[in-house]
Image (cartoon, coloured by chain):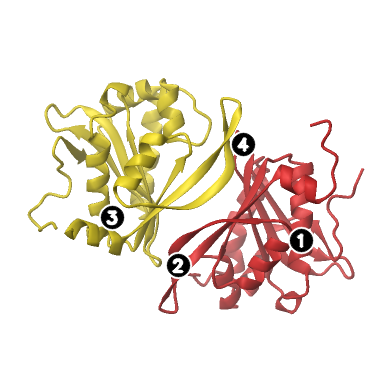
Chain colours: A yellow, B red
Amino acid sequence: MFDIQTQLFEGQDIRFGPIDHEKDPEIESRWTHDSEFMRLMETSPARPMSAAMLRKQYEKLEKQVEEDKNLYHFMIRARADDRLIGKASVQRIEWANGNGCLQIGIGAAEDRGKGYGTQALRMLLRFAFAELNLFRVSAYVPEYNLAAIALMQKFGFVQEVCRRKALERDGRRWDLYLFGLLNDDWRDQAKG
Amino acid sequence: MKDIFTGKFVRLSAFDPEEMSKAFARWSLNSEYFRLLNSSARPMKSAKSEAKWMEEEVAEMSLASYFFSIRTLTDAKLIGELGLEVVNWSGREAFVGLGIGETEYWGRGYGTDIMNVLLRYAFTELNLKRVTLTVFEYNPRAIRSYEKVGFRHEGQVRKALNREGRRWNAVYMGILRAEWLEQNGYQTTNE
């Protein structure tokens, strides 16, 4: 397991940090012009976004963090050169029930398949279970996001719900899964 | 054309914030009602405070949100609330939430009637592709009613709720347009 000196926000190759309002909008704007990234991340229609739109979105996000107290958001950066790689969050936290939703995205195609998502999910789970003390976490994954499904399964997530044919993309309908992981199962796994 | 607002016992009617905020504030004093409908804890809220979000929502006339009040056919009595939220237009999926605040109408087939009217609205007016709902494991009466109108079980969020010191699942149910049309004898030849 972890001790209190093991840093929550430091991984092997990545770290979690705050938004850089100067530099990050330009970078995320590039990601949004990659339709594959947008369709893996979001169930709402993909559309390219300008740096100005993202700047506004970041402000809204930080306002929500401040006011609603049910959202934790991290920018994922490379430890080597601090460049922005992706983003990770625990959203829609229900404190009375101890649950929340996770979302992770690795923005640039050349950064995918390098284990950054695995490291980010490991850090995010520790934050959700050992810092926020959530009882369980959920994640929505479309049927076609095979990399995300494999990642969920690696961490012991169970496919709990299948919203049949909830999405339509490329002229066919796809299921939308909800994966869940309980704190107890995560702890057992971290011990073993 | 069919009258799509009217069922056997009830009809869908306009959602008037002034009337609904008062009714909702009163219904929510019944903690059982609120806990059947919501996973969060109910803060004590005045009708005035409820009216605020209702007025904003209704004034917006959003194409993603449809709110109705439920009235009896016999005496136009307001007995419940109904909301349909299109969560994804490109997937044409909506979530539905239904509450019968007047408890003397529980267990008499009103919920089933309302849901039948709602599904007809969702599939033959909004032309959605699927309707989804979540219901709590401790609400078997609602689950039976949803099964009756054709919703299928699509899984359970394990131990999603903590109430009275124990954990309960949240149940996901869904119905597809094709399933509903077939069950209700619609010809789909010109689809």
Q: Quadrant of residue B159?
A: bottom left
Q: Which mark is residue B114?
A: 1
Q: Amino acid at mark 4?
A: Trp
Q: Amino acid at mark 2?
A: Leu
Q: Amino acid at mark 1?
A: Ile
* Image height of A8 relative to B31, above or below: above
- Where is residue B107 shown, x and y percent of the image? 73, 75
**3D distance between C-alphas at marks 3 and 4:** 31 Å
Q: Assign a secondary structure to mark 1.
A: helix
Mark 3 residue crowding within 10 angstroms, few (<14) / some (14–19) / many (20+): many
**Residue receiving disc 4:** B89
**Residue receiving disc 3:** A128
**3D distance between C-alphas at marks 1 and 2:** 26 Å
Q: Amino acid at mark 3?
A: Ala
- Where is residue B48 shown, x and y percent of the image? 60, 64
Identity of the residue drawn at 40% across and 78% down: B165
Of B101 and B1, the residue lying toward us: B1
* Image height of A98 relative to A138, above or below: below
Q: Are marks 1 and 2 on the same chain?
A: yes
Q: Assign a secondary structure to mark 4.
A: loop
Q: Are marks 2 and 4 on the same chain?
A: yes
Identity of the residue drawn at 64% across and 43% down: B60
Mark 1 residue crowding within 10 angstroms, few (<14) / some (14–19) / many (20+): many
**Residue receiving disc 2:** B161
